[in-house]
Amino acid sequence: MTDGELWERYRAWLYDAPGLGFRLDVSRMGLPADWIARMEPRLAAAFDAMERLEAGEVANPDENRMVGHYWLRAPDLAPTPDVAEQIRSTLGRVKAFAAAAHSGEVRPERSDRFEHALVVGIGGSALGPQFVADALGGASDRMTPHFIDNTDPDGIDRTLGGLRPVLDRVLTVVISKSGGTPETRNGMLEASACYEAQGLDFGRHAVAVTGEGSALDRQAADRGFLDRFPMWDWVGGRTSETSAVGLVPAALQGIDVDALLRGAAEMDAATRDRRAAKNPAALLALAWHHAGDGRGRRDMVVLPYKDRLALFSRYLQQLVMESLGKERDLDGNVVHQGIAVYGNKGSTDQHAYVQQLRDGVPNFFVTFVQVLRDRDGRGIDVDRGGITAGDYLHGFLLGTRKALHDNGRPSMTITVGDVDPRSVGMLIALYERAVGLYASMIGINAYHQPGVEAGKTAAASVLDLQRRLVEALARRGERGGTCSQLAEEAGDAGSVETAFHLLERLAANPGRNVARTAGASPFDAVYRARRA
């Protein structure tokens, strides 16, 4: 294809919204000229499904709940006045609490004001807040954000270790809808113990974002948390960034949450247009469908050429993969759907995996994210002719885009003017809508996650086996036993491999009081309970 033909394709396919400060170019995705017309019946059905969802139809049959994240930035669309009022009042409470924390009206036990915010959550209760904090944070932050987003003891120690010298000025935000999510509960218990070790009352340094009446809600009330904010059952974790889940940490950091919500609302309005060529979310969904034959046969590589968007691909991994990664379609047929997402940032990717993208397995499409504004001020020239560091970054983006196209690798490009609360809100809303439309087009439910629940159930059974192995070790005393013997005594001889892994890890941690004596092979090792 000649440069002139590429230019004409660009002009034909470009979505340009000057009012939004947003562009989407799908011209290099290889879409046939009649692709929109061919997909019109599926897309029309997807728009119908989206309208029913926004009107309050039950969309998650597993939990018999509505899916209403779009109402969060447009309360007037909520199905009842009560829901609309809950959204408005919660936003008001979030902003008021943040202002009180910034002014010192809400203050810690032994200091004048809070200076740090520790967010404890996982999945949708951490990925969105982390992305927004990194994208929009800086020297002007009112409170410095930190995160515990796993149950890794070493990771927890690293985070809390850095906060110990200033712990009397740290506000902890615990986020869990049910209050029973093990990773979040464990992080809260570890944080609470850290406060208590310094003679601080954890409740006087904590707020909760949780479901009304949940285990965490009750515990927060009993321990006198500074405040509690709601997580509604009609907001899923991966679409919760514009709820209190994302707004509480953002407001505490000092981010303009009204602008974030405004950007999301403006993108929502743009993506309700039933004309596909005038709807950026529909164009995304159509491009995904074409790239992967509607079966996810190509991975989505996200390459933002902006450091502030480095966490965007991690955020999208959950939103896209948890929404679209499904075994069965809406009719119960086994389909094994999904789109894998990974990414880095430009121009780091030039020195990482662009070599494979250009010359290796062609099992992907690239989404470039371009930010027009480089920095505050002009900056210095780094090369002759007035070339700046930002010019190099832009050159690498355009060069990589061309190199991929020249080798038949599809890509699209999103362009925003700057990374600010409004544009971040737009990006979040864009992909939420695109995921919903694409899911409808391929006939799956984007709003449940049975695979996640299966993993949680399996993990619970593993921990139950560990408890029984520890009891078996105590009963056997000095005799100890091999993994096979201990699994049998624990009443689960069929889980000997799991028992082996559990015993090996227990023996590797001195504080667990399990001794290991090597045998002729790893499987002949003998484990004994150490005396405390």
Image (cartoon, grey):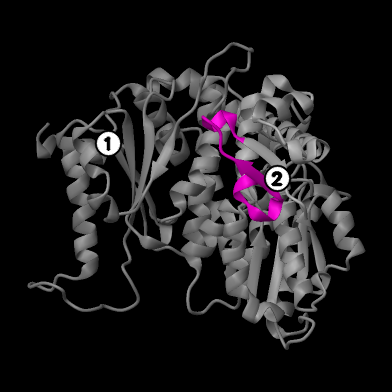
Q: Residue at x 63, y 57 (%)?
A: 246
The image shows residue 121 at horizontal and vertical percentages of 66, 54
Circle 1 packing at 10 Å, graded few (<14), some (14-19), many (20+), is many
The image quadrant that residue 155 belongs to is bottom right
Q: Which residue is drawn at 16% across and 76% down?
A: 381
Q: Is residue 153 magenta?
A: no
Quarter placement of the C terminus: bottom right
Name the kind of residue labelled 1 in the image.
Ser
Circle 2 sits in a helix, a strand or a loop, which is it? Answer: helix
Circle 2 packing at 10 Å, graded few (<14), some (14-19), many (20+), is some
The image quadrant that residue 33 belongs to is top left
Q: Residue 279 carries which label?
A: none
Q: Residue 27 carries which label?
A: 1
Name the kind of residue labelled 2 in the image.
Leu
Q: Give the range drawn in magenta.
A: 506-525
Q: Is residue 225 left or right of residue 59?
A: right
In this rendering, the answer to whether 44 lies above or below 184 is above
Q: Is residue 185 left or right of residue 399?
A: right
In this rendering, the answer to whether 352 lies above or below 374 is above
The image quadrant that residue 203 belongs to is bottom right
The image shows residue 91 at horizontal and vertical percentages of 72, 62
Tally the numbered discs. 2
The image shows residue 222 at horizontal and vertical percentages of 92, 62
Pick whichever, 402 or 220, lies toward us: 220
Q: In this view, does 439 lie to the left or right of 243?
A: left
Pick whichever, 406 or 156, lies toward us: 156
Q: Name the residue under label 2.
A: 77
Gap in angstroms between the C-alphas marked 2 and 1: 34 Å
Circle 1 sits in a helix, a strand or a loop, which is it? Answer: loop
Q: Residue at x 81, y 67 (%)?
A: 227
Q: In this view, does 414 lie to the left or right of 279?
A: left
